[in-house]
Structure formats: C-alpha cells, structure tokens
Image (spheres, coloured by chain):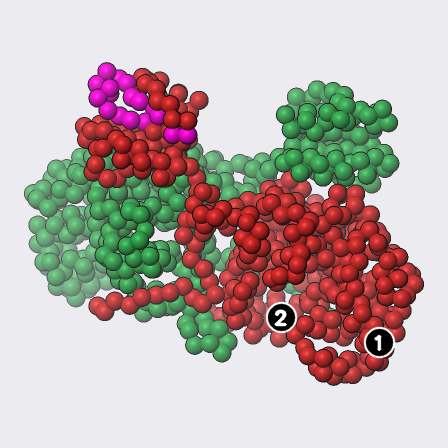
Chain colours: A green, B red
Amino acid sequence: MPQRTFQAPKGTRDFYPADLALRRHVEAAWRSASVDFGFEEVEGPTFEHLELYTVKSGPGIVSELFSFRRAGGDDDYALRPEFTPTLARMVAARGGSLPVPVKWFAIPNFFRAERPQRGRLREFTQWNVDLLGLDTPDADAEVIAVAALALERLGLRPADVRIKLSHRGAMGAALGAMGVRPDQVAGAFELLDRRDRLDPAAIRARATEIGLSDAALQSLMLAAATRIPLEGGAAAIAKALGIGATGLEAIDALCAALGARGIAGWCEWDLGIVRGLAYYTGSVFEIHEASGAERAIAGGGRYDGLVELVGGPKTSAFGFGMGDVVLSLVLKDRGLLPADGGESLLPRPDVFLISADQSADPVMHRLAAELRRAGLHVRHSYKTTRNVGKLLGDAGKCRARRAVILDAGLASGQVSVKDLDGGSQTAVAMSDLVATLTA
Amino acid sequence: MPQRTFQAPKGTRDFYPADLALRRHVEAAWRSASVDFGFEEVEGPTFEHLELYTVKSGPGIVSELFSFRRAGGDDDYALRPEFTPTLARMVAARGGSLPVPVKWFAIPNFFRAERPQRGRLREFTQWNVDLLGLDTPDADAEVIAVAALALERLGLRPADVRIKLSHRGAMGAALGAMGVRPDQVAGAFELLDRRDRLDPAAIRARATEIGLSDAALQSLMLAAATRIPLEGGAAAIAKALGIGATGLEAIDALCAALGARGIAGWCEWDLGIVRGLAYYTGSVFEIHEASGAERAIAGGGRYDGLVELVGGPKTSAFGFGMGDVVLSLVLKDRGLLPADGGESLLPRPDVFLISADQSADPVMHRLAAELRRAGLHVRHSYKTTRNVGKLLGDAGKCRARRAVILDAGLASGQVSVKDLDGGSQTAVAMSDLVATLTA
C-alpha cells in the first residue's frame, strides 16, 4: 500500500508532552483560582443542538460553526463555540433546584470555523467562570477577582495586563445624555463594537443608517476613546464625556466592590469595551495585554436574560471566558513560560532504577511494581547497557530525584541510593528500601 | 419571544459538579498510574481528517463517525472515535526524532455515532496508554500493569475484574495446528470476533464462505470457549486445544513478563478475545467485570504496523483504551463510588468566613482576598442573615474545615477560629490570622 502522510486539521494543535505540560500549567492556575474562590467545576457535551446557538446569536452564527448531522439522523448539531449556552441550558434544566448562587467554572475545548490567525485557532481551550443568581456589583467583582488571581499565579502583574471595564446600562445613560436616542442605543453599541473593522466612511454610513446625528457620532467616538483610572469613577467619566453623572451610579458601585477585593490596581474604565454579543446587560469587561498587543486575553460581563431565553427561570448571571491561545502568547512574551518549551514542567521521577547486572532485572521489576504501588513515580532504562555511569546519565536526563542502583551488593541484601539533586550516595538494606524512599 | 427548552444531544452527558467530581476521581487514578510508570501525557485535535480513519479501518467506519465539512470548505473531518490514529500520526510526524521508547498516555473525549445503550454513549472519556518502539513481552506487560495499577487504586481487586489475554500470532499457529489454513486465519479471527452477534446458522454460513471445514469450525469454537489460568501457559493451552505447543512460545514469554510485574493474579488466558480491529498483530487483551457483566472495561494489544500505515517509520507499538462509562458502572456496582453521587469528592473549603455584623463585611472581603492569594480555598455566605449559628450550619453544609467568625471581638483585633471537624474554637489576633490558617 502506498504510504501517505497526515497533518492535524488546519487551526488545531498536536500537544506533545512538553506542549501539554505548558497548557496544564495554565489550566492549573485557572483551576486553583476557581476552587479557592469556591467555584465548582462542570462540563457539558462537546457538541450541542445547532439551535441552541442560533436561538442565542441568530442564524448568522452558523457560518462560524462546525455543524453536522449523524448519517441517517435529522438533528443538526454544532461543535460548541463557547460555553455560555451550555451553562444556561444546564441551569435551566435544573430550574430552581440548584443552590443559589450557582458558582461554576469549566475548562473545555471550543471550536470556531474561522480563518486561523495569530491568537485565534479553530480549536482552543477556554476557562469559563460564571456566578448566577446574584445581581449585585459584588458578584461582578468576585468573578473578575478570580480572573485576576489566576493571572497573578501565572506571574502577571497589573503592569502587564489591564482589566478594562465598561457598563452597558451606564453607557446607555451616557449616550442618552450625549444625544443618542434610546432606540439608537443598541445600534450605537454594535457600531462601537465593530468600529475597528470599519473604515471611517463605513462608520459614517452605518451611523446614518442608525439615524445618529453627526454630533451623536462624534460623542460616540469620544466615548470609545475614553479611558479613565478605576478610582476616577462616575465623576471622572462624566467629566471626560462632558455630561452629568446621573445614570452612572453602577460605575461607582462596581468601583467599590472591586476595591474591597483588592484588585483595583488591575482595573480601569475603557468605554470602548462593549463586547460583541448582544446578550450582555450590565457590566462588561475585557482583559488585554497592557500595551494593547495581541487580541483580548479574556472577556465577559453580565447576561441576566440568557437562562430564561433557553427555557429556565429568570436568572441573573455574570461570567467570562479566557482562552489559552492569547494568554500563552502574552506569558511567553513576558518570559513567564519556561524557555525549554515545557520540558521542565513534566513530572519528575521519584526514583530511577538501575540494574547493574542482567541477573538483577527480575528484582528491578518487582521493586518497580512495589514502589509504584506505594505511589512513587518510577522509571528505569530500556537500554541493554549495564554501564552505571551511562545509566545515571539517563536518570539525570529525565530529572529523576534519586537513583537506586542494584549491583553486587544485592547478594548481601544491599542497594545504593543516590540523591541526584544533592549528589550523596548511601547504602540501604533492601528490606528498608520502600520505607526509605516513601519517607 | 416564546420560550423553548433544550436537552443535551442524545448519548451525551451534562456533568454537574458532583457528576464531574466522580469522573475526575476516575481520571485521577488513570493519570497517577500513568505518571508513576513514567508515561507522559499528550493530546491531539478533537477532530481529524476523515481519511485518517478510513485509511486504518476502511470506508465502513464512516457510518459510525460524526463527520462534517466547514461551510465553504472542501476537507472532510470526523470527530475522533479513538486515539490510536492520532497517536500514530503524531509519532509519524516526528519520524525517528522521538526518544525511544515513546511512552504516552492521553485522557481525551471520543465520539461514536451509534445507538446509545448501557455502557455505550455517543461521547465518552477514554484513557489511552501506549508504549512504542519496543517489541518485547516486557513492553506488553508494562502497559497491562499500568491498567492494573489504576484499577487497584480505584478499589478493584483481581476478584472483581479479569484481564483476559490472547495472542494473535500464537492463536494463528494454534488454528493452523487445528486444521485452519493460513489464508483462512484472518477470516477465522473475524468470525471469532463477531460470533456473539451471529446466530448458529449465520456462523455456519460465514464459515462456509471462508472455506472452513466443519472440523475446523468446531476447533475454532472450542478455542473461543477456552479459558486457562495465566500460569498454565502454552502447555495448558495446547492441552485444552488438543495440539502441540509449537508456535505458542509467545504465550510463556508474556506469562513471565506479567509475573515479574506482580500482576499475574489479575490475568488469565481467554482465547475468545481477538479484538475487532484488524490492525492488531500480537498480544491482545480485554478487561472485563469478573462475572461477565457489562461490556469490556478496556481493550488493547500490539499494533506494529499502524505508524507506518500513516506515513511514519516502521514502529512497534502496544497500547489500550479504557472508557469511563463501563468502568463507572462496575465501580458503582461494587460500591466503590461514594453513595452521595460525588458530593463528598468536591473540594473542601479550608476556611468559611462569617461576618456577624454588616460593618465587618469590608474586612471579610479583604481577608478572603488575602487568604485566597495565600492559596486557601475560602468561602462565605451570600445570605443577609447575621445569625452565626445559621451561618455555621452553611459552613458545615459545604464541608468547610474551619470557620472564621468576625464579630464584636474585631474592635479589639480578635477573631474566632472554629475547627469544624474537631469542634474547638479559639480566639486569634487578626495580625496572626493568615499565618495561623496557612500553617
């Protein structure tokens, strides 16, 4: 048969051991931050009914999804592009029977049928944190604080990444004060969200379609460029926009809740943040590399209507997603990932067994089994060489903590235990070996 | 908008926190056994080019897969039904540059477009362990020993589950000695594999197609029913089949290698095991519940041709897959999963903070942030009640280890720390609190 070769599908990744160790390192920070805040892990199906996505995002979403049917089946499915619809469905299915607030996190893989580019792949891993059933700035601040803790554990500092906040309700009030009519606000948000992908003429054309006056469009663009230190709050935002602070009360409430959690230093107001998804209802945020390099590291906000939309009770909700791809680029750029590509993150063997003579092989295999049953990570060479120096070299290469050398001493019940970090070597009786190594 | 409700797709699962804790418990045993044997974790794409599966399994596999194209694209993809093709592709892509032997494990999700039934779902999690580049009974035995260690860590014993072994090469020799011609052996294996799904007339019809004599078919069915204790080895198998032991040498070599690893007690010969997949070349095995209840818990074997088939160098390989669905049924049946559905496997909070007066809330939030940054799992109530007794009840419900009560003592810099396991309560100065709790 002629040989043929295969590649991974475009936009997907093969994770060799060191590659996966890097991803697990990021996931461990995500998981520990979630757990320390009392969030519990959930998971759902990798694919859902296609309609779960179209009911939330409209039929336009279909072209961005990998969708399919089972041969002979008539249900349309799609690989999940995000977790929120699954989460809303799971909350809806349990109706009012879940303890409130619901505090869930998930670390699934997601799929987007887009053109792969820097920071955006067709399959990626994303951390999701959601707090449901609590409609207060405290809920918003707690979820944002989980994100900050994970970033801190990965070595990032407020100088490296910025949590950029806005608030849809307050922004609606601000736009109203700046001459945007209530019926134009949704269109204005959409225009804000798409502004970086449109040229000035297209922006003006879209503004005309919405019915925005030139003055209102100027105000909108002024808002889009407005960045204010967190502690400036509503007063500073009102001043920057040339309006009164009425309707901006949510701004100061969120400031206070973030400050109470010790994360004010990570945060700032950026009124250009709107989040594309139509279902956000209150606070919204994105996390960006401080200089603006790369795509957003994370994004989220309040989505109080979604659980009801998929058949559940009215449920307030705040959450975010943080993907592994952009975050890993930022960590690498900041020198926060090991330069060896992840090799140093692989599990270290506790013991490397060296059989200096073939006659010791049966003892080595029995000992390996016993030590593994006792919970130790045990390796040995598969080479035919019996050169102890070479085998100690192999033990060092796989970063074993200790080597156990089975040599002539075995006849009198003795083995040598070498500490490969410190270098010391001691003789240990076989009968004490397991106790010594597991101590 | 009219409400509509959504279910998870047929044959898939929603994992609420306790459900996922159960799966993570199983995965932890898989992962720790793999690591303790020196296997390194890998992962690949959730979908692959469809042809990767058809080149290995033939076009018949397509109806068992979820396959799809990207809108406007012309590549056919399929959700992965198993890991081996991905693994073979990844090994082939690195050619000879990987350190030998390659010892990899993976715990991905897989997808089969089959009718869901007990023990078989459309999406499931499966542990894969593979050792490549070593063509010895030691390699086979080591991989099988990893499976046994994980099962033991989950509480199973040799009386609960049996590792049933056969060997395609030895069985080919045995069938030859029983009158099956070399050109009939592949057909005979296929018939063995399918025998439980065929009635006697269909078995006879298929035997006639292959050209098996009545005597050869009888021998085949005798072999299919032959179970021999592991230590009986080639001699006992030859005796049971009424043939000589020539050609069965691989049997005794595998016996010795399994015995050297201390797992002989889990193993037995079952010549009815052939494994459906055509690519197995040597030892094959399945793990079954001891009484024969449920489907196979795991299955695997030697597949020395696969890496070459997908474009890599000739590479010997031995591996298995163990799914979460059947294993969980067996564990549940044996009482080896918590009766509370997994609640007791959820992470326990280290500290539950109780603010006995609203004025203490800012201190509580600052303290929570500080303790979490120190690595503790910290919770607090979201209720408006300030009844310390009720709040202690909530702390107990979420299985917190300690409660920290912020009450009137706060004015003089004191808080109460209550040990919720032991019941003792002590006053601690705020300035010592973090050190006390992280000690």
Q: Nearer the viewer, residue A151 or A197?
A: A151
Give percent across and percent down for residue B6. Answer: 34, 65
Query: Which comes before the other along the chain, label 2 or label 1?
Result: 2
Q: Which residue is mark 1?
A: B216
Q: Residue at x 61, y 67 (%)?
A: B53
Say which chain tag 2 marks.
B
Mark nearest the camera among 2 and 1 is 1
Q: Secondary structure at mark 2?
A: helix
Q: CA distance from mark 2 to mark 1?
A: 32 Å
Residue at the image point whose x is 79% and y is 53% from the top: B230
**Res B364 quadrant in image:** top left
**B409 or A303, which is in the foreground?**
B409
**Where B221 sits versus B283, above or below?**
below
Relative placement, left or right, of B5 versus B113 is: left
Residue B302 visible to the viewer = no
Q: Quadrant of the C terminus of chain B?
A: top left
Chain part drawn in magenta: B404-421
For residue B243, above or below residue A366 = below
* Residue A391 image-quadrant placement: top right
Provide residue A418's location: percent of width, then percent of height.
72, 24
Residue A414: give x, y in percent of width and height.
80, 24
- Residue under circle 2? B54
Give the image location of residue A310, x and y in percent: 29, 63
The kind of secondary structure element at disc 1 is: helix
Q: Chain of mark 1?
A: B
Type of amino acid at the residue the image marks with label 1: Ala
**Rendered view: A282 above or below A162:** below
Q: Nearer the viewer, residue B151 or B303?
A: B151
Identify the image quadrant of the N terminus of chain B: bottom left
Q: Is residue A86 left or right of residue A369?
A: left
